[in-house]
């Protein structure tokens, strides 16, 4: 099969890779309908995360089940399925508490490489959720978004306790931040402040329901948020970048007793304990337990109530995966969808 | 009046200080029935927090109202009252959301010096809660505990989401940690693991309802907690020390998706962002909004349902304040009650 392989920072190639096979009786093999490039792939692409090259890459996927192992009893060949970026058994105590991303048997999909034609998914019954039927083609981008960015944006908004009567600020205008805006509105937030200085992203934020746009960042951004919230800060803040600057901006934008949901994969961040202590905020985040939300998110998409697939502003054949990365790296695209 | 003054690290003296007077129309003057020494006073006493000497000190207090300003309408002379270590108006949006410790008009009681005969309390109507009548003398230690350590332990247990079906681990065996044990049990936790290597504190933890004692600390302590929790970590962890070691021990003792309530005043702590991210825990803490809990805690004490005053294992006349500090500094006493 054809699959993307990262050779070195900036060097991604589509290559012939061996077709995956059932390796454990709980595995499923999917023929992918769509896959995409994640902001977190860019950390590796840019060399910020070390890579043992050459490595398969990609962890977002939707597709049709081709084969299942002997112990798979819920998922069946022929079903259209959505899975999370981390495989999970969905039965351990951590999964049952809703944190499938920290399943005691969690396995990385990224290491298996979902930017490909075929994908082996471990613990298929725990990891995958089937749609009610084969989806219309126009639903595929949104279902693919549910696999990571939509689930992550939703988790961030829940972690930030977005809801009625609350003002939500969103730090980060990548796909996850933009979908954090959409999730916050779906959860009932009255006011959602998107922090972005890019016009096209501001427009998408507004389409997703942002009521205010703040272009300042860092301490100036914090001041703007305070001006918009009677000097108090936002009730809820979503952090979707993962740098020291973005985390401090997020912490300082949250009012005392407020909630910060942080989902930007942390890079080089050190949180000052004393400032955090006196901030009096709630902090929750990490790799999103997307599996928890999949049934609900799929249902919303199936009913055409939400259209998170709008974050894909570039669609390419898988053959052009390298251009897909370049476009995101250069911020010409918010998110690239790839058709195998 | 007589009041304690900290001159330099290790040098605390009882001196004649001017009687406090009504300075603002929202003030009250209290004649204190009891006051005490806090673990957080020890940071100054030990020189870890800089002190502009000579400074009044002490922020825990109960007593009888002697006088009130013209704008005080709820609190009346003659009432027996309990207040928090931070004065708050109890009407601003932050107070109304339950975070009176971060009131937009918050004022430090410590700077006014509650280790004294008399105390001026700003924003008396917002800060003070009257008991149903003059208390029996045996209730005074518990009512005094409500002023800080009991309210702080309660907040920590709530921040850690202690409750039915959950296992709670407590890092720190000072008065707050021990009262965290009591609070966790009152909130319905089935299992409470106290981390302590001091026999007398272990006994008090057991009296407060600890079901397990762990004597190891640091990484070994974390391993012990995991052994006791099927390798997962505790659902809820209370941190009541404030050092780098105790915070890391607490973070690592919390299972993914679990809750860490931290109330040890942070000293020299830097939290590694990436480890915190992948921990997937909830983090909440800071200066406890004791005022939120005072009505409930006073009610419990008045009904003699809880006896948090048991943390006082040394009672001295205010004249012997220096010995009260020394005994706590040398860990001969958990907490010193002072009678003016």
Image: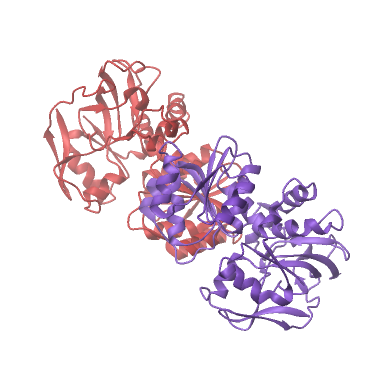
Chain colours: A purple, B red
- Of residue B15 and residue A108, the one placed in the foreground of this image is A108
| B37 to A52, vertically: above or below | above
Q: Which image quarter: residue B115?
A: top left
Tell me if I can see residue A225 in this picture. Answer: yes
Q: Residue at x 44, y 52 (%)?
A: A216
Count of numbered marks: 0
**Percent x, y for residue A127?**
74, 62
Location of the N terminus of chain B (image quadrant): top left
Is there any visible trace of residue B173 in the rendered image? no
* Left or right position of A305 against A226: right
Task: Return the residue found at the far right.
Answer: A78
**What residue do we see at 34% from left, 18% from top?**
B75
Can you say whether B157 is above or below A99 in the image?
above
Q: Residue at the left extreme?
A: B16
Measured as percent of width and height from the top left, residue A28 is found at 80, 69
* A258 to the left or right of B54: right
Residue at 77% across, 59% down: A140
Q: Position of residue B240 (x, y in %)?
A: 40, 49
Vertical placement of B140 versus A340: above or below? Answer: above
* Depth order, front residue of A218/B47: A218
Toward which corner of the image does residue B58 lie, by quadrant?
top left
Q: Quadrant of the C terminus of chain B?
A: top left
Residue A312, image x, y percentages: 68, 60
In this rendering, position of residue A54 left or right of residue B267: right
Q: Quadrant of residue B63?
A: top left
Q: For this rendering, which residue is in front, B310 or A169? A: A169
Tell which of A276 and A314 is nearer to you: A314
């Amino acid at each position: 099969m054809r699959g993307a392989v990262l050779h070195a920072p900036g060097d991604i190639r589509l290559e012939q890779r061996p077709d995956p096979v059932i390796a454990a009786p709980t595995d499923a093999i999917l023929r992918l309908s769509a896959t995409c490039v994640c902001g977190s792939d860019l950390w590796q692409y840019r060399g910020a995360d070390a890579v043992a090259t050459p490595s398969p890459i990609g962890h977002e996927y939707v597709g049709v089940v081709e084969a299942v192992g002997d112990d798979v009893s819920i998922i069946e060949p022929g079903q259209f399925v959505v899975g999370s970026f981390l495989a999970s058994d969905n039965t351990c105590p951590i999964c049952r508490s809703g944190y499938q991303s920290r399943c005691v048997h969690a396995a990385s999909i990224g290491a298996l490489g979902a930017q490909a034609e075929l994908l082996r998914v471990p613990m298929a019954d725990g990891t995958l959720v089937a749609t009610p039927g084969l989806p219309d083609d126009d639903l595929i981008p949104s279902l693919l978004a549910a696999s990571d960015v939509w689930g992550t944006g939703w988790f961030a908004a829940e972690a930030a306790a977005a809801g009625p009567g609350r003002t939500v600020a969103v730090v980060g205008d990548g796909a996850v931040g933009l979908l954090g805006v959409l999730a916050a509105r779906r959860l009932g937030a009255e006011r959602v402040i998107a922090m972005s200085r890019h016009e096209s992203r501001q427009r998408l934020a507004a389409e997703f329901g942002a009521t205010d746009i703040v272009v300042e960042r860092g301490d100036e951004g914090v001041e703007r948020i305070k001006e918009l919230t009677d000097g108090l800060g936002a009730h809820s803040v979503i952090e979707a970048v993962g740098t020291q600057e973005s985390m401090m901006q997020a912490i300082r934008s949250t009012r005392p007793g407020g909630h910060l949901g942080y989902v930007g994969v942390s890079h080089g961040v050190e949180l000052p304990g004393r400032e955090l202590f006196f901030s009096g905020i709630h902090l929750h985040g990490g790799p999103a337990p997307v599996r928890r939300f999949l049934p609900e998110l799929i249902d919303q998409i199936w009913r055409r109530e939400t259209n998170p697939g709008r974050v894909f502003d570039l669609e390419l054949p898988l053959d052009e995966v390298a251009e897909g990365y370049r476009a995101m790296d250069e911020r010409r695209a918010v998110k690239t969808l790839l058709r195998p």
